Image: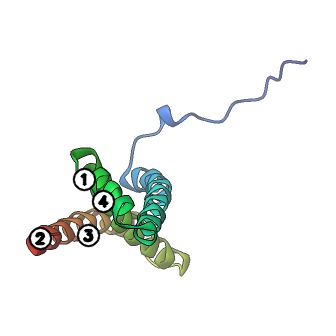
Amino acid sequence: MSVSHRPLSPHLGIYRWQLTMALSILHRASGVFLSLGTVLLVLVLLAIATGQSEFEMIQGLLNNIIGQLFMLGWTVSLYLHMANGLRHLIWDAGVGLGKNIANQSGVFVIAFTVIATGATWALAIWSGS
């Protein structure tokens, strides 16, 4: 095998982290996490269709601290992926591609994610679910 003397592409370590870069990575990660949550949703629906004892088993898994943290992460992923996806749709239309507006829309994505997640969990706790 011959050794190539071509330059290598730059590594992430030389770039200064930006909000748009971090949200891009989080968008991909939230998509993966949403897939895992969808598998869990299918298991819950199967447990409901199968019978009372299976549903109680799944409910027991989700009512402990690990299950609650998973559901919190799934809720965060849902709102982050949705808001960032809408942001990308707007970018696809050619709107909001400037540096300042891209950063402002990134802050909006984070704020929306936090507020929507908090509201969802507050409503769930308030309703006694």
Whole-number angstrom distance, CA of label 1 to CA of label 4: 15 Å
> x, y percentage for residue 64?
22, 48
Give the secondary structure at mark 2: loop
Q: Amino acid at mark 2?
A: Gly
Whole-number angstrom distance, CA of label 4 to CA of label 3: 33 Å
The part of the image, by quadrant, that contains residue 75 is bottom left
Residue identified by numbered label 2: 128
Residue identified by numbered label 4: 56
In this view of the protein, can residue 73 be seen by the observer? Answer: no
Looking at the picture, the colour scheme in use is rainbow
Does label 4 or label 2 sit earlier along the sequence? 4
Give the secondary structure at mark 4: helix
Does label 2 or label 1 sit earlier along the sequence? 1
> x, y percentage for residue 55?
35, 63
- The mark lying in front, picked from 3 and 2, is 2
Give the secondary structure at mark 3: helix
- The mark lying in front, picked from 1 and 3, is 1
In the picture, the disc for residue 112 is 3
